[in-house]
Image: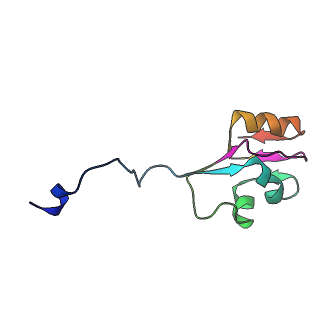
Amino acid sequence: MPLQRRIPKRGFRNSLGNRVVEVALSQLEVAAVSGMVDLEGLKVRRIVRGSPDAVKIILSGEITQALTVRGLRVSAGARAAIEKAGGKVEE
């Protein structure tokens, strides 16, 4: 019997699917360039490597300064924390 039929089939991994990178809220202050955070700033600071399909900011940690987030996906909790600190989210 061929090898591919002898090995058990388990799970499914879609290697061609979208690659979404999650960035913690506490990492935004490091990546901010003059109060603005975007994909290029995250790549320059090496928080995001390669070329992901999307970047999503999640609520993990806290921020103390007002930041403008441009062109990134933001979770509801992270959006509330950014606006509470005096920042804004532009999509």
Identify the residue at horizontal 68%, vertical 51% (top origin).
Answer: 23
Residue 42, picture quadrant: bottom right
Furthest residue in direction left, as rendered: 1
Percent x, y for residue 57?
A: 69, 45
Residue 27, picture quadrant: bottom right
Q: Is residue 16 left or right of residue 86?
A: left
Identify the residue at horizontal 58%, vertical 64% (top origin).
Answer: 50
Identify the residue at horizontal 90%, vertical 46% (top origin).
Answer: 64
Pick whichever, 80 or 44, lies toward us.
80
**Magenta part, dominant SS:** loop
Part of the protein shown in magenta: 56-69
Residue 51, picture quadrant: bottom right
Pick whichever, 51 or 24, lies toward us.
24
Quadrant for the N terminus in the image: bottom left
Percent x, y for residue 38?
A: 74, 53
Residue 57 lies within the magenta run: yes
Percent x, y for residue 81?
A: 81, 37
- 55 shown above or below 82: below
Percent x, y for residue 68?
A: 82, 46
Quadrant for the C terminus in the image: top right
